[in-house]
Amino acid sequence: FFEPFLILPGNMDIGKTLIDALDLQSSSGIKESSDLLIDSYLIQARANVFRKGYRNWREFAMKQRKGETVEKVKGAAGEMTDIATGVVTLHQSSATAVSLADFKSSRADLTAADATSSTDILKASLPTQKTGSGNSMGQLSAARLSRANLDEGASANLSFSSQAILQVKSIAQLSRVDVSSGGGSGKGSSENLLLNANKTMSSAAMDEIEKPSEWTKFYITPFTETPVEPKKVQPVSNHMLEHLIEQGSRAKFPTYRRMADSWIVHLGVGGFHRSHQAVYTDLLLHYYKEHEHEEDEQPDEFYAFCGMGLMPWDKKMYQTMQDQDCMYTVLFRSDVGTDAHIVGCMMDYLFAPEDHDECIEKLASPDTRIVSLTVTEKGYCQNVNGTLDTENPMVQHDLENLDEPQTALGMICAGLKRRMEAGTPSLTVLSCDNMPENGDTFRELCLEFAGLVDKELHDWMAENTPFPNTMVDRITPMTEEQHKLILKNEFGIDDQWPVIAEHFGQWVVEDKFACGRPEWEKVGVLFTPDVKPYEHMKLRLLNGGHSALAYVSILSGHCFVDSAMNDAAVGGFIFQYLESLRACVPSVPGVDLVEYCDQLMKRFSNPYIKDKLERLAEDGSKKLFNTMRGPIIELTAKGCSTSGIACAVAGFIKFMSATDCKGEPITCIKDPQAAKLHRPCEVACSSPFDPTEALTIVFGKDVIAIPAFTKQVSQMLEHMTKHDCVHLLQHYQSVIGENA
């Protein structure tokens, strides 16, 4: 990262000396040198050295800009290095001078007094380093471990010592895994460790042991603080808030009154709702608290969320909310830092399978003003023609048993039916899913469902119930055990089910509400009469880009989004994909689409949230319909290239065939149409490479009516089969005879 910005005073050797002297490390350097850093406290200490090096580099750069001659630079420990000769003068004594290489190999960032128990276990395996004059410099600190310091035997001894139990103080410790090598070292012990660990560890834990360099990037940010002492960890609860106040925690937590005048019932309380709509609402409550002495800034009524789980698997969220007084933590991580935000605006949670009537009554209550939902595309029960999927067993159940609804459609219509019968005014239905014209779409499906239940209900809803369109944006990966570890180590927070998210967030809402709404505009929400331009931009570029990225990256051997983006073939393809899609994105007020795409590339590359490709690959048949069908038709009509979409769709078809380019099985498929798509996708991946049936299932007849696109997908599949996915990404435009 730093090398292009350094003004080198001569040659690359001097430049390398300068980088070493300043203690600078690129992200690739951190990855290269940290595979063996298994203690999160040691990782934090290493990050502290990085921060000091960065400050030294800034001081050096400022002098360069001023035209000052710089002969010596300061390192992280205060040592001074002569740029030309590489001689280091130690901070403790100006008379002591050693070579830079010897100084680096001997430095200890953690003293013996600082060492943790795991450090004591490990240090016996470390080699002794010598200075240029032959004097022993003592044992290396565990904080300075790197491949450069360890030969193959020492590395094996360090990682899988036969003398002691390896105490993995990161994710493995959370899983209560202490693994003995059982004798021997090296490869055999490594296999034994993974074999034994696999019996008890989560998939996230195995990811960390098998791919430690990937997770090191998660633990380290340039803002990670070196802990003075371990945090006192407490579970999330109302009692914990008092503790956070006493210790002056840097986490954000509720200081406002946790009582509601009016309710927003939310269906589908998953990670995204908790990182997005709930966070905005929580920020609004903080805003009112901060302006509590300003009468003009106080609302007529305070809104809070009541979560509602419809499905049996929502029992875990229900129990978590009960245990934590309906609070949870969002861990925000990006290149601007790490922040924890305990959200308190959810003040109740209902579980429908245990009491359907209580849930319907909550929706029918006059105090409930809005029902919002994030139930994903498949929760809309929409078929490929865009109408209600009446063949869906859950839809059929709700049409016959509206008193015990299983779908969001059924629950909302049941609640509105009671409001109508009681003479209570209607409420607002606020869709927050990644669907084109999500409010309009859900309105049509709700009215179609209501019409099959009760003609009077259909007419009443059509006249009285608004369904605003919205655009929502915040990348929110799946919660892993590593996220809980960060919260414990850095903030002292023990959360059963936290949320990990990027800092960036955006919410655009059509201002069309039945009986009031929160003043979300005070905390950055944009209200507008027309959401569609924002919606098209986000769905086609971000969501479509995520889908374009997911399948080709998995087929290229990647697991994490950021590592895939660092692959030149994948990253280059995504850049070109976004560039080609801009032709079908309408002008968006106040947005430069080129800058927006550049920002997406940066957001996709965020190494600090460790987003997984398998998350992006879920429900692909529904996502592609919503994000790529329109662009295929529109780009074709404009005479623009569709090669990028064809390549992405070919990746999806190959993925859904359940066999990768090496003939290995793909085991992470989660799609509502997986069974229906499997055989057509298998057929499409062998001669004569005909994707017609698979494309019909995903996109419907309109896309099949474009023979040129079907041919492009066929050519992509043939090329991928004869070569591999990486080769296709590098040559996909020439595959169909286009200019790069």
Image (spheres, grey):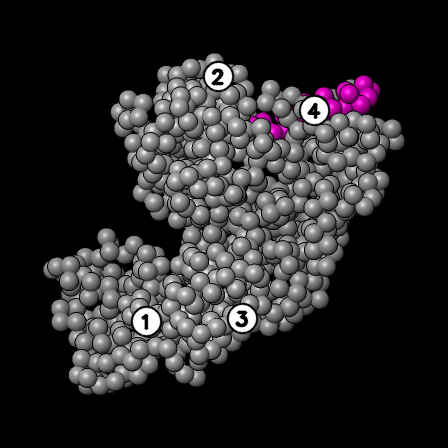
Q: CA distance from mark 3 to mark 4?
A: 51 Å
Disc 4 is placed on an element classified as: loop
Three-letter code, disc 2: Ile
Three-letter code, disc 3: Asp
Sequence-wise first label, 3 or 2:
3
Give the residue drawn at x 76%, y 31%: 410
Q: CA distance from mark 4 to mark 1?
A: 62 Å
Pointer 1: what residue? 153
> Which is in the foreground here, disc 3 or disc 2?
3
Looking at the image, which is closer to me, 451 or 459?
451
Residue 655: x and y in percent read 47, 35
Q: Is residue 628 visible?
A: no
Say which mark, if any, is on residue 704.
2
Is the Cβ of the residue at disc 4 closer than 8 Å to that at disc 2?
A: no
**Does the segment drawn in magenta span residue 444?**
yes
Pointer 3: what residue? 178
Three-letter code, disc 4: Glu
Disc 1 is placed on an element classified as: helix
Which stretch appears magenta? 434-457
